[in-house]
Amino acid sequence: MGWSHLLAGALLQVVQAAPPPTPPVVGLCRFETAALSFAGSPAEQARCLMTPVGKRGVLGPAPSRLPKGLAPLLEGRSALPDKTMVARLLAAENMDIGGLDAPVSRARDGDPAAPLARYFVIHDTSTPYYGDDPFPADVDRDAKVNSFAYYFPANADPEKFPVAHLFLNRIGQVLVGQPLSRPWRATKLETRVIGLPAKGLFLHIETVMPRRRDPAIEGWNDAIAPKPGFSRTQYDRLALLYIALSVRAGSWLIPAQHATIDHGLPQAHDDPQNFRLNDFDKALRRRLRSLG
């Protein structure tokens, strides 16, 4: 074979191996890859990212406005609470998230010149799975449901597990999976579309929620989640985590949901199921009032 053919073959291999170009704008909420941000102001981003998520990831209409707890925070009309007071509250409720003085992650896999984490991403674990069996009678207090063992498998690959920064069960216990300072990815937008630049831009919170099979859907599925989806205690602790992580980041984080971040991408997830923004907002207002 001549050199020209060898060179052409080598160039073909390089072209085939090159990753596809990253699109400049991605998804329902229009993630702008150059800016490493969804489109719009923080309040506009939150309205899109908190669009209600229905069964199998079908989205409802986006809220016309943010509820009255979140709105002043994301519109720049309310300052962060005092760090010392938040730290005392975390200690009083036995919630150890690694302190408030340490940094949060930065985008581009921790690049010092990249933006700090901007997004507070709410997931549900979709575990434990009950198949065709009913949920426990008291799903919020059931020991199997609230166990963290599923999410911290023995001898797991530390590059894959635990899959989120924080885990929150239905009785309000919080366990650190990945340090908040560690750049981590847990959505398909981050791993399959944006890639390394997005690593560290999102803080991921897994809320414990069991699932079961919907018999109306053929084959395996985990389409049924409890109603209500989150316990009152989960909303209460999630609100405190939102405040604490925002204080640690130095600005109010933009709340988002796994399903809305990945909407429109292949094999997108459907979590969190049965999340009620108004219930979260009420919990947030209670927490903010307690902090003065």
Image (cartoon, rainbow, N blue to C red):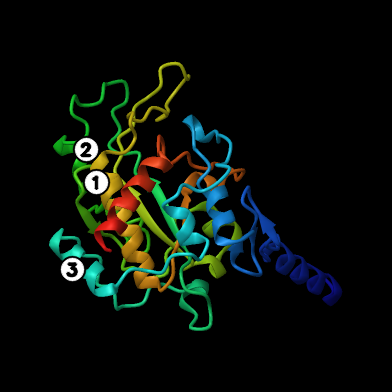
Residue 131 figure quarter = top left
Mark-to-mark CA distance, 3 and 2? 29 Å
Disc on the earlier residue, 3 or 1: 3
Q: Nearer the viewer, residue 217 or 254?
A: 254
For marks 1 and 2, give the one nearer the viewer: 1
For the point 33% across and 28% down, the residue is 227
**Residue type pointed to by label 2:** Val
84 above or below 217?
below
278 above or below 87?
above
In-image side of 84 versus 191 (left or right): left
**Residue type pointed to by label 3:** Arg
Q: Position of residue 258 (x, y in %)?
A: 47, 48
Mark-to-mark CA distance, 1 and 2? 8 Å
In-image side of 120 versus 290 (left or right): right
For the point 43% across and 65% down, the residue is 78
For the point 22% across and 31% down, the residue is 139
Q: Position of residue 261 (x, y in %)?
A: 54, 50
Element class at badge 2: helix
Q: Position of residue 138 (x, y in %)?
A: 18, 29
Mark-to-mark CA distance, 3 and 1? 22 Å
Quick check: can you spot residue 181? no
Q: Which residue is mark 1?
A: 169
Residue 88's mark? 3
Q: Which residue is mark 2?
A: 145
Disc on the earlier residue, 3 or 2: 3
